[in-house]
Structures are given as C-alpha cells and as structure tokens.
Image (tube, helix red, strand yellow):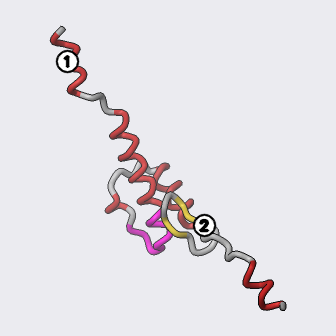
C-alpha cells in the first residue's frame, strides 16, 4: 500500500526562468540576468561565461529587451496615414 500512496503524489514541477529549465534554484539564471541588466547587454554573443545557467539568464535578458524594443516602436503605417490627412 505504501507504494500506491507514493505514486499518487505528483512529481514537483521543474522550475523555469524566462522559459529556461533550472537545475536547482535558478540562482545561476538570476545571476546571468542581473549581470546582463547591469552591463546593458544587447547581444547574445556577449553571454559566453563558463556556466550554462548564467549564459541562459543573460540570454533571457537580451531576448526580453529585444521583445520590449519591438513593442515600443511606433507603427510606421499609422503615422503615414495620419500625415496624409
């Protein structure tokens, strides 16, 4: 009966950090993200440390900044239409 009870307990979901799987507590990812933010990293090629989790955190920062930049750009078509009126 003990075996049946243990099978009923779901396995803990693996933690993720901005879509990247964490092996333990995501501290390496958080460190890479913070480092990238402090250094205003904008190119994933600059995320080339010795730790995969650090690099993934850095990459997450770069990806987030690129996504935010794309959302903040004005729509050129709407501006052209407004200027014709």
> With respect to residue 42, does 85 lie above or below?
above
- Identity of the residue furthest to the top in this view: 85
Residue drawn where x is 36% and y is 47% of the image = 66
For numbered disc 1, what is the local secondary structure?
A: helix
Residue drawn where x is 39% and y is 53% of the image = 63
Q: Which residue is more in the foreground, 83 or 51?
A: 83
Residue 15's disc is 2
Residue drawn where x is 60% and y is 71% of the image = 14
From the viewer's perspective, tell me whether residue 84 is left or right of residue 30: left
**Residue hosting label 1:** 81
Report the span colored magenta: 48-56
Residue drawn where x is 36% and y is 33% of the image = 72
For numbered disc 2, what is the local secondary structure?
A: loop
**Which one is in front in this view, the residue at disc 2 or the one at disc 1?**
1
The C terminus: image quadrant: top left
Q: Which residue is more in the foreground, 40 or 17?
A: 17
x, y percentage for residue 37? Answer: 48, 49
Query: Where on the picture, by quarter, is residue 6?
Result: bottom right
Find out whether the residues at labels 2 and 1 contact each other: C-beta distance under 8 Å. no
x, y percentage for residue 64? Answer: 43, 49
From the viewer's perspective, tell me whether residue 58 is left or right of residue 77: right
From the viewer's perspective, tell me whether residue 58 is left or right of residue 22: left
Q: Which residue is more in the foreground, 72 or 80?
A: 80
x, y percentage for residue 22? Answer: 56, 70
How far apart, in angstroms, are the residues tagged by discs 2 and 1?
46 Å
- Sequence-first tag of 2 and 1: 2
The N terminus: image quadrant: bottom right
């Amino acid at each position: 009966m003990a075996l049946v009870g243990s099978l009923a307990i779901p396995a803990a979901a693996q933690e993720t950090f901005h879509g990247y799987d964490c092996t333990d507590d995501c501290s390496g990812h958080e460190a890479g993200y913070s480092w990238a933010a402090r250094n205003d990293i904008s190119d994933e090629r600059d995320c080339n440390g010795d730790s995969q989790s650090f690099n993934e955190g850095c990459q997450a920062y770069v990806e987030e900044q690129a996504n935010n930049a794309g959302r903040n750009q004005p729509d050129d078509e709407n501006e052209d239409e407004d200027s014709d009126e």
